[in-house]
Image: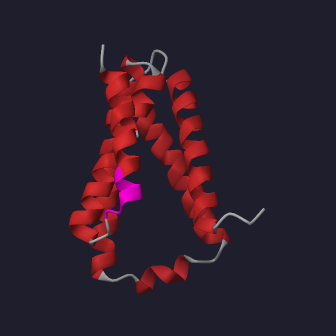
C-alpha cells in the first residue's frame, strides 16, 4: 500500500483533532459563557504554538516576514477568532453533531473564495465534493 502524501496525513489529523475539539468544547461549555471559553482556548493555543516555535528555534524567521505576510496573517487571525466565537456560541446552543456539520460548510466558502481570489481550478472532482457537502448540510438543516 503506497504511503499517504504528507499533506493528506496532516489534513486527516486536522480533521481528527477538529472532531475532538468539538466534543471537548461541548463538554466544557456547561454553565460558562462561550466567549470566556474561547478566550481560555485561545490562551492555551497561544502558549502551545509559541512553545513549538521556540522549541524548533524558528523565532528568528519572524524577521523575514513581509508586509504582505503580516497583513494576511492578521486577517486570518481575525477570521479565526470570529469563527471560534461563533462556533462556541453555536455549540452551546445546539447539538455538536449538527453544529459541526454546518461548520464544515466552510468548505463551500473556501472552494468559492479559493477560485475567485487564488485562481485555483474548479475541477469536476472538487465540484462533486462540494455538491455532496452542500447536500449533507441541507439534510441536517432541513426539519
Judging depth in this view, the residue of 141 and 65 nearest the camera is 141
The single residue placed furthest to the right in the displayed view is: 1
Q: Residue at x 56, y 28 (%)?
A: 23
Q: Is residue 130 left or right of residue 29?
A: left
Residue 59 in which image quadrant? bottom right
Judging depth in this view, the residue of 27 and 61 nearest the camera is 27
From what the image shows, is residue 46 above or below residue 59?
above
- Taking the magenta stretch, the answer to whether it contains residue 124 is yes
Q: Is residue 60 left or right of residue 65?
A: right
The single residue placed furthest to the left in the displayed view is: 116
From what the image shows, is residue 103 above or below residue 123?
above
Q: Residue 12 location, x and y as percent?
A: 60, 51
Q: Residue 52 location, x and y as percent?
A: 62, 64
Q: Residue at x 64, y 59 (%)?
A: 9
Q: Residue at x 56, y 59 (%)?
A: 49
The single residue placed furthest to the bottom in the displayed view is: 64
From what the image shows, is residue 141 above or below residue 4?
above
- Colouring rule applied to residues: secondary structure
Question: Which stretch appears magenta?
Answer: 122-127
Q: Residue 115 location, x and y as percent?
A: 26, 64
Judging depth in this view, the residue of 55 and 92 nearest the camera is 92
Q: Residue 127 location, x and y as percent?
A: 34, 53
Amino acid at each position: 500500500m503506497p504511503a499517504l502524501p504528507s499533506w493528506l496525513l496532516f489534513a486527516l489529523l486536522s480533521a481528527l483533532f477538529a472532531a475532538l475539539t468539538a466534543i471537548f468544547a461541548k463538554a466544557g461549555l456547561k454553565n460558562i459563557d462561550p466567549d470566556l471559553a474561547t478566550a481560555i482556548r485561545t490562551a492555551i493555543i497561544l502558549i502551545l504554538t509559541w512553545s513549538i516555535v521556540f522549541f524548533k528555534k524558528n523565532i528568528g524567521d519572524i524577521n523575514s516576514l513581509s508586509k504582505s505576510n503580516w497583513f494576511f496573517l492578521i486577517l486570518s487571525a481575525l477570521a479565526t477568532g470570529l469563527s471560534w466565537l461563533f462556533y462556541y456560541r453555536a455549540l452551546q446552543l445546539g447539538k455538536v453533531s449538527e453544529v459541526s456539520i454546518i461548520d464544515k460548510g466552510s468548505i463551500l466558502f473556501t472552494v468559492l473564495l479559493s477560485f475567485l481570489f487564488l485562481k485555483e481550478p474548479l475541477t469536476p472532482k472538487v465540484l462533486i465534493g462540494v455538491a455532496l457537502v452542500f447536500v449533507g448540510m441541507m439534510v441536517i438543516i432541513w426539519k
